[in-house]
Amino acid sequence: MASSLSPIEYIRSVLSIFVFFVMFTISTPMIALLLILSFGKATNFIVENFGPFIAYPVLWTLGIKFNVIQHGEPVEPPVIYTINHSSTLDLVTMIALGLPHIRFVAKWELQYNPLFFIVGHLTGQVFIQRKKSEKAIRKLQNTYDRLHRDKLSIMVAPEGSRKHPGVIGPFKKGAFHMAIDLGFPIVPIYFEGNQELSLGGSLLSKSGTINAHIHPPIDTSGWEKETMDEHIKELRSKYLEWAGVEES
C-alpha cells in the first residue's frame, strides 16, 4: 500500500508519526500539572484544547486540510457522538474537533502505550474490550453517573474496529444501549476522506482534504430496547448514504 504514496507523502507520513508522539510527550506533563493546580477541575479544558493542540500539527505535517462542517445548529452537551471508523487517521481527526465536555470510548489496547494510559486515565476516557461485547456494555454503563453528573458527552465508533468489511461496517449495540439508558440524543459525525487518504493501519497517508460533517441530533427519547435493531439500521443507513454506497 505504501508504494501508492509519493516520496514526499511517505516522508510526511513518517514525520507525522514522530510529530504525534512529540506533541503527546510535550502535552503529558502539562496536562498533569494543570490537573494538579486545578484540583482536577480542568479536565474539560484539557480535552477540548489539548486534542487540537496535538492533532493539528500532525495533520499539517501530513499535508491534510481539515474542515469541520456543521449541519444545523451546534448542540449543547450531553450527547452521544457517533463516528465512522475505518482508518488510524480517525484518532487524529476525532481529537482535532475539540468538542465541548467530550470523553472518548477507546479500545483497551491503547493503554499498552504508557502515554495513552496516563493521559487517558487522568482525563477520564473510557477504555473497553471491544471483542467482549457484554463486558464492553457493562463498562459503558458504569460511566452513566459521571456522564449525568458532569453533563459529559461521549464519542463512540459503532463499528467498533476500523477493520471491517465494506466502507461502513456492521454496527455494534453499545452506543444504542447508552442512548436508551441515558436518554441522550445521538449526533452523527461523518469523516469524509479518512479512508481514502489513509493507507492501512498506520499513519501513512496521502495529502488531501478531510471534512468532518457534524449532523443534526437524533432524538432518542422514544427509543425502546425492543426496537433497537431498527434504530441501528436507520443510523447505519445514514452513514451509507453519506459514504455514497448501497446498503448491505
Image (tube, rainbow, N blue to C red):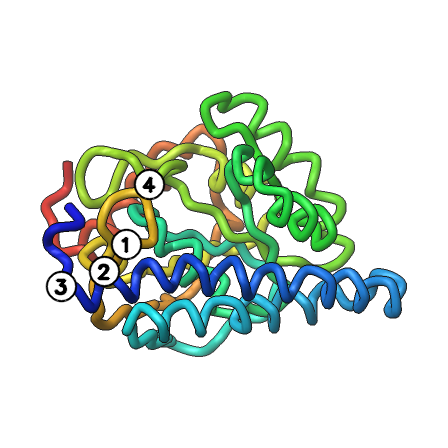
Q: Which residue is mark 2?
A: 10
Marks 1 and 4, how far apart at CA? 15 Å
Hey, what amino acid is under mark 2? Answer: Tyr
Say which of 199 and 148 sits in front. 199
Tag 1 and tag 4, C-beta contact below 8 Å: no
Inspect this view and state whether residue 78 appears.
no
Q: Which residue is mark 1?
A: 204
In the image, 120: left or right of 11?
right
Marks 2 and 1, how far apart at CA? 7 Å
Tag 2 and tag 4, C-beta contact below 8 Å: no
Say which of 112 and 165 sits in front. 112
Where on the picture, by quarter, is residue 145? Answer: top right
Hey, what amino acid is under mark 3? Answer: Ser
Tag 1 and tag 3, C-beta contact below 8 Å: no
Q: Nearer the viewer, mark 2 or mark 4?
A: 2
Tag 3 and tag 2, C-beta contact below 8 Å: yes
Q: Which residue is mark 3?
A: 6
Marks 1 and 3, how far apart at CA? 11 Å
Tag 2 and tag 1, C-beta contact below 8 Å: yes
In the image, 26: left or right of 202?
right
Q: Nearer the viewer, mark 1 or mark 4?
A: 1
Local crowd size for mark 1, using a 10 Å CA cut-off: few (<14), some (14–19), many (≥20)? many
Helix, strand or loop at disc 3? loop
> What residue is at 57 percent from the left and 41 percent from the top?
113
Q: Which residue is mark 4?
A: 162
Local crowd size for mark 4, using a 10 Å CA cut-off: few (<14), some (14–19), many (≥20)? some
Residue 135 is situated, as x and y percent measured from the top left of the image, at 58, 23
Mark 1 or mark 4, earlier in chain:
4
> What residue is at 41 percent from the left and 57 percent from the top?
17
Hey, what amino acid is under mark 1? Answer: Leu
Mark 2 or mark 1, earlier in chain:
2
